Image (cartoon, rainbow, N blue to C red):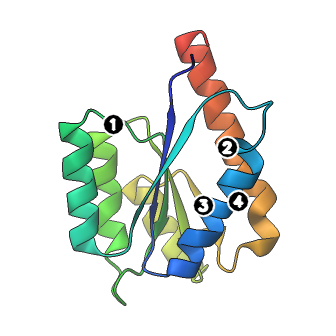
């Protein structure tokens, strides 16, 4: 059996969390052609992020992808989380999900270690989210041999 693909969503908007979970479930979990099990984890506050990261370290869970909102609890705390996530999970693909797409925001996220950016609302970017997950899955297959 293939190793699991673990996806963390950090967003204080529960609709975004549900939309991502639904997108993942519809395109991967319920898809018989996709053989790697996918686990999704969500955090909607800084304290919950700390708890999820703590538990993941204790339980030896490695996050492969993190979809990260930059404005959590109406602050720009997401920027501070990027290096923390990359410290614990260096190979984790951190994808910023934000409604703010100015060049300063993109540059700051990139400098902090983000690997990509998806603008909210992302209904028109669902294909891009699916592509990101498929690419990470392919990388994991190449790394592990299955």
Pointers 3 and 2 in contact (C-beta within 8 Å): no
Per the image, label 1 sits on a secondary structure element best described as loop
Of mark 1 and mark 3, the one earlier in the sequence is 3
Pointers 3 and 4 in contact (C-beta within 8 Å): yes
Q: Sort mark 1 into few (<14), some (14-19) or many (20+) by Cα contacts within 10 Å.
A: some
Quadrant of the frame with the N terminus: top right
Q: Sort mark 3 into few (<14), some (14-19) or many (20+) by Cα contacts within 10 Å.
A: some
Residue picked out by circle 1: 61
Image-based side of 6 in relation to 29, left or right? left
Residue picked out by circle 3: 21
Q: Is residue 87 above or below residue 4?
A: below
Image-based side of 104 in relation to 89, left or right? right
Find the residue positioned furthest to the bottom: 74
Quadrant of the frame with the C terminus: top right
Of mark 1 and mark 2, the one earlier in the sequence is 2
The residue depicted at 60 percent of the width and 61 percent of the height is 21
Q: CA distance from mark 4 to mark 2?
A: 9 Å
Image-based side of 43 in relation to 28, left or right? left
Q: Is residue 97 above or below residue 40?
A: below
Residue picked out by circle 2: 29
Of mark 4 and mark 1, the one earlier in the sequence is 4
Q: CA distance from mark 4 to mark 1?
A: 22 Å
Q: Sort mark 4 into few (<14), some (14-19) or many (20+) by Cα contacts within 10 Å.
A: some
Of mark 4 and mark 2, the one earlier in the sequence is 4
Marks 1 and 2: which is nearer the front?
2
User: Toward the viewer: 111 or 26?
Assistant: 26
Per the image, label 3 sits on a secondary structure element best described as helix
Q: CA distance from mark 1 to mark 2?
A: 19 Å
């Amino acid at each position: 059996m293939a190793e699991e693909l673990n996806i963390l969503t950090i967003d204080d908007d529960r609709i975004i969390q549900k939309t991502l979970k639904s997108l993942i479930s519809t395109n991967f979990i319920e898809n018989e052609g996709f053989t790697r099990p996918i686990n999704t984890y969500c955090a909607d506050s800084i304290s919950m992020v700390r708890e999820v990261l703590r538990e993941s370290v204790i339980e030896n869970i490695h996050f492969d992808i993190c979809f990260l909102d930059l404005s959590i609890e109406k602050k720009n705390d997401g920027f501070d989380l990027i290096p923390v996530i990359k410290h614990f999970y260096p190979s984790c693909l951190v994808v910023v999900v934000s409604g703010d797409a100015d060049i300063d925001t993109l540059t700051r996220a990139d400098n902090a270690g983000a690997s990509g950016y998806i603008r909210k609302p992302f209904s028109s970017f669902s294909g891009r989210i699916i592509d990101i997950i498929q690419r990470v899955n392919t990388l994991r297959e190449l790394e592990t041999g299955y």
